[in-house]
Image: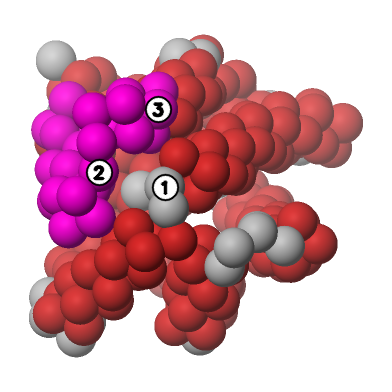
Amino acid sequence: MKRIHKVGLILGALAAVLAFGAHAWAQKGKAGFFRGRIQAHIDSALDAAKATPPQRAAIGAAVDHVFDAFKDGQQNHGAELEEALSLFKADKLDDAAVTAHRARREAEAKKVGDAMVQAIYDTHDALTAPQRQSIVDFVKQQHQQHQGGHGGMREKFMGHMIDSRIDAALDEVKATSAQRATVIAAKDRVLAALQSSRQDPGADFDKALALFASDKIDGTQVEAMRAEHLAKIRKVADTIVQAISDVHASLSAAQRNTLVDWVRTHQHEHHG
């Protein structure tokens, strides 16, 4: 889901280029495959907890609600990408339009977050205390097995894809050395912000499991975690908006038009 959330931060042509590798991966992987893997993990956890059919049905409904919320947020991405590209082509960035675009994306993220929080409450209430502890133990075991496995390789692979896309786009617009330096610096700031937003995931992981295992979920702690997550999203979005502004200012109108055409062409190739 991290990859897909990165795509959700598209606010203009630069972000489209930065996220293009992740977007193509998500499209080629297909939503059904992604959901199938998530469902397989959920089924394994429920097996470990010896969940009854009624419990599985209740939890299944909660999971469906999350995926429905996520799907709703994805439906208009094609139109929003076109809007973002049009904004980038303009001689001057429309700050009001960028702000409105960003507000819609934050609203989508909040809707998915609401569904996820409700699913956690529903799952917590559907299970007994021993069952919740069994699931926590199972999740911790799975996390330990996968920790430090291919994460570093995935990061390097995605970084290579992003760099390759940016190089190809800059070649297409015949960017100068100075323009390339501006774009690369913008890209580095965006990736650094994304990396910073994922710092200390272990602490959040342990905190979430402790909340789930408790007899009653502490709503105050849940809201605090959500607020912290939203603050991180906004910080990354601030960095992306500034990066877009920097790149927009560094390119000529003709280059921006060429870049937009390049993004559109390659997007359709990967959606075909």
118 left or right, relative to 8? right
Residue that label 3 marks: 58
> Considering only order in the chain, which callout, 2 or 1, is on the residue closer to the N terminus?
2
Question: Would you call the spot at circle 2 few (<14 residues within 10 Å), some (14-19), or many (20 or more)?
Answer: some
Question: Would you call the spot at circle 1 few (<14 residues within 10 Å), some (14-19), or many (20 or more)?
Answer: many
Q: Give yes or no for contact between labels 1 and 2 (Cβ–Cβ under 8 Å).
A: yes
Q: Position of residue 106 (x, y in %)?
A: 69, 39
Q: Main secondary structure of the magenta part?
A: helix
62 left or right, relative to 115? left
Q: From the viewer's perspective, is residue 108 above or below residue 134?
A: above
Residue 34 within the segment the image draws in magenta: yes
Badge 1 amino acid: Leu
At x 62%, y 51%, the residue is 244
Badge 2 amino acid: Ala
Q: Nearer the viewer, mark 1 or mark 3?
A: 1
Residue that label 1 marks: 127
124 left or right, relative to 233? left
Span highlighted in magenta in the image: 32-61
> Considering only order in the chain, which callout, 3 or 1, is on the residue closer to the N terminus?
3
Residue that label 2 marks: 51
For the view shown, which residue lies furthest in the right direction? Answer: 96
Q: From the viewer's perspective, is residue 61 above or below residue 156?
A: above
**Front position in the image: 242 or 145:** 145
Q: Give yes or no for contact between labels 3 and 2 (Cβ–Cβ under 8 Å).
A: no
Q: Nearer the viewer, mark 3 or mark 2?
A: 2
Q: Which element type, helix, strand or loop, lies under badge 3? A: helix
Q: Position of residue 100 (x, y in %)?
A: 80, 29
Badge 3 amino acid: Ala
